[in-house]
């Protein structure tokens, strides 16, 4: 008989394929007829011993609830806009691989973020990114309700199961307000990610935070120990928990109990990035779900500040890189903020050719990316071959989808991320004559840009136009292209297919940044301002190169940073064109030093040990 790796639900030993029995739409396998007969008599008695099935997935032991406004679960589900959502997806993928008992909650976003088109002048057009939930998700047939503007808004749930390499499943619950029972206006609340006005945003945050907690209860997750707020969008969940816990004997809300249950990750190093709502709006939309005095005490006197609310009711708070913790600590004195540096899901972001190479040299790497440290022993020629394969795929894509003609032999720089002023995609274009001079004297350069600007971010759209319109004007030796509709698929193509990853944010605005980590796992070094993760990831000349110094970056004039960028670029071009061996050495170190560390497997293990299972840390006093 052929033994299955699926457990017998009666005794927990391995089952046999021949000894199966179908119940409630699932096939179960048994070690013996003894167990099968027992099961057939009273199946429900054994249902909590199930192997990984929908049933377990829903009612089983899940201790950690992960809340995120956006999740990049897979490229065809457009419910993410950028780094925050991709990080959430990578986190969930690593949890599934490592069997971390998590359930995730997000909003459905029927029209996604948006599809970006660029017209002949480089103007961004935004088209709705419609998708059909039932193609990807399974309706759970569960509904809960919340009150918004004194109307009852019903929410239904859809399920997506992320299956890890171990076969373990992390369920992701998508909340959806598009139900016929709801007012027409409320049916649109789960349409657009980061769309609409403040009222729309607050309503969405009620659905996510309050609706999310209620839905978890409805779905039978009765054993949640930690609610993890991935950014402040979900922090209204703390109010639902406060209410649920009721009053203590002294008549106060039980803040400590909620703190024990909540952990918070902040991602925004600047004050303007935090969601704030006037109490007038809060009164209209949310109503008084806890007494206003208590709410102001927790969330701020002037506005309801979602970050402050999360900070005050979380037993563990972390920032996403060491430098980011410093800036957050300065922004929020008096709170104890820990540092857990971001990562990426190594398997997801490695391109085909490198996957094959790693599988051959480092078979354990898929579920143990730390073992990529032995990439130093991979033959240089094979690293180069794998890289050129990825590069050709990118170049073919550029040549097929744009009017530009790129060549695989030419040094290629990538810059792809949300288009917004602080990320300064145009820093390398500060002095185009100098850039052309460098290319002419050392070797040609190709620049691949991509990125969407938020529909309301006019400076972000200007940047796209500017770069787009420069693309035919500089010099034959400097080719520039701006690819449309940056998303996870394109992100994978660009981070693996370029020779150098460029990152030039205005410090200290980049909390972490993760695209450079995706490049690293594909052997692509970074040239980056010392901000976010790069302060930890940069070993000058070995994993990449820095622009400016970590301490001075903030005060530097933009033109100084541009000059330094050009200086470094000259050195880098020299190595690339005249010292290929040294170049490949750098590629190997990207993988061995950074690929092995800046991944979500390492990251989630730190969350488990330091955040999810740490004892409640009291707020430090000033
Ligand atoms: C990785 C990724 C990001 C994040 O990039 P940053 O460098 O952190 O800005 C944004 N968008 C997409 C589509 C990504 O894949």
Image (cartoon, rainbow, N blue to C red):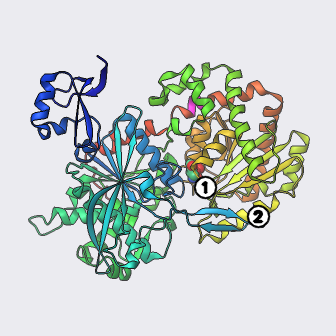
Q: Which residue is mark 1?
A: 507
21 w.r.t. 619: above or below: above
The circle on residue 303 is none
Q: Is residue 378 left or right of residue 47?
A: right
* Residue 349 vs residue 43, the one in the foreground: 43
Q: Quadrant of residue 486?
A: bottom right
Give the residue at x 61% y 43%.
Answer: 492
Q: Residue at x 87, y 55 (%)?
A: 474
The front one of 480 and 539 is 480
Crowd around label 2: few <14 · some 14–19 · many ≥20 (10 Å): some
Local SS, label 2? helix
Q: Which mark is residue 466?
A: 2
Residue at coordinates 26% horizontally, 45% vertically from top-left? 63
Position of residue 558 measured from the top left corner of the image (x, y, whole percent): 72, 59
Q: Nearer the viewer, mark 1 or mark 2?
A: 2
> Is 402 on the left or on the right of 345, as rendered?
right
Residue furthest top in the image: 1
Q: Secondary structure at mark 1?
A: loop
Q: Is residue 544 above or below residue 148?
A: above
Tell me: residue 182, above or below residue 602: below
Expressed as whole percent of the image width and height from the top left, the position of residue 577 reads: 82, 33
Decide which of 611, 44 is in the foreground and name it: 44
Residue in the image at 67% along x and 26% along y: 383
In percent of width and height, residue 463 lies at 71, 64
In the rendered image, residue 19 lying in the magenta stretch gets the answer no
Dividing the picture into quadrants, the one containing residue 142 is bottom left
């Amino acid at each position: 008989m052929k033994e299955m790796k699926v457990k017998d639900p009666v005794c927990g030993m391995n089952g046999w394929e021949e000894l199966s029995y179908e119940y409630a739409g699932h096939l179960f396998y048994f070690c013996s007829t003894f167990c099968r007969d027992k099961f057939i008599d009273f199946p429900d008695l054994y249902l909590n011993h199930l192997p990984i099935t929908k049933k377990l997935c829903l009612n089983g032991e899940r201790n950690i609830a992960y809340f995120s406004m956006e999740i990049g679960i897979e490229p065809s589900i457009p419910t993410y806009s950028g780094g925050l959502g991709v990080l959430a997806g990578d986190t969930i993928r690593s949890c599934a691989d490592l069997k971390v008992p998590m359930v995730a909650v997000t909003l459905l976003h029927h029209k996604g973020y948006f599809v970006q088109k660029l017209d002949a002048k480089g103007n961004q057009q935004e088209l709705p990114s419609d998708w059909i939930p039932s193609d990807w998700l399974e309706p759970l047939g569960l509904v809960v309700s919340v009150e918004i503007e004194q109307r009852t808004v019903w929410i239904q749930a859809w399920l997506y199961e992320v299956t890890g390499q171990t076969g373990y499943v992390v369920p992701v619950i998508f909340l959806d307000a598009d139900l016929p029972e709801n007012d027409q206006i409320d049916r649109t609340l789960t349409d657009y990610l980061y769309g609409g006005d403040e009222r729309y945003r607050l309503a969405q945050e009620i659905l996510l935070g309050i609706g999310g907690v209620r839905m978890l209860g409805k779905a039978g997750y009765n054993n949640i120990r930690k609610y993890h707020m991935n950014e402040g969008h979900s922090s209204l969940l703390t109010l639902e928990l406060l209410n649920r816990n009721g009053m203590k004997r002294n008549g106060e809300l039980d803040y400590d109990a909620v703190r024990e249950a909540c952990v918070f990750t902040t991602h925004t190093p600047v004050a303007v990035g935090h969601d704030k709502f006037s109490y007038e709006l809060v009164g209209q939309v949310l109503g008084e779900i806890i007494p206003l005095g208590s709410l102001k005490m927790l969330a701020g006197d002037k506005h309801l500040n979602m970050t402050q609310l999360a900070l005050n009711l979380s037993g563990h708070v972390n920032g996403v890189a060491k430098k980011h913790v410093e800036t957050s600590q300065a922004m929020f004195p008096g709170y104890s903020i820990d540092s857990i540096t971001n990562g990426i899901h190594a398997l997801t972001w490695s391109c085909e050719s490198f996957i094959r190479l790693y599988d051959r040299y480092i078979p354990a790497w898929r579920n143990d990316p730390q073992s990529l440290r032995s990439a130093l022993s991979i033959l240089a020629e094979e690293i180069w071959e794998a890289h050129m394969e990825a590069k050709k795929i990118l170049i073919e894509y550029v040549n097929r989808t744009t009017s530009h003609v790129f060549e695989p032999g030419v040094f290629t720089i990538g810059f792809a991320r949300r288009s917004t002023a602080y990320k300064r995609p145009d820093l390398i274009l500060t002095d185009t004559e100098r850039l052309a001079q460098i290319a002419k004297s050392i070797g040609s350069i190709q620049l691949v840009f991509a990125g969407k600007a938020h529909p309301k971010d006019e400076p972000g759209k200007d940047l796209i136009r500017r770069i787009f319109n420069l693309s035919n004007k500089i010099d034959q030796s400097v080719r520039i292209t701006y690819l449309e509709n940056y998303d996870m698929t394109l992100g994978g193509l660009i981070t693996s297919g370029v020779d150098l990853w460029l990152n030039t944010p205005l410090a200290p605005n980049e909390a972490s940044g993760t695209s450079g980590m995706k490049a690293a796992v594909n052997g692509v070094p970074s040239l980056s301002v010392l901000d976010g993760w790069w302060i930890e990831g940069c070993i000058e000349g070995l994993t990449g190169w820095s622009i400016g110094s970590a301490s001075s970056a903030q005060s530097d004039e933009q033109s100084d940073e541009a000059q330094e960028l050009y200086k470094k670029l000259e050195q880098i071009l020299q190595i690339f064109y005249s010292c290929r061996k040294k170049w490949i050495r750098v590629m190997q170190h990207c993988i061995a030093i950074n690929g092995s560390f800046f991944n979500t497997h390492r990251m989630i293990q730190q969350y488990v040990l330091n955040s999810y299972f740490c004892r409640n840390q009291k707020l430090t006093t000033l």
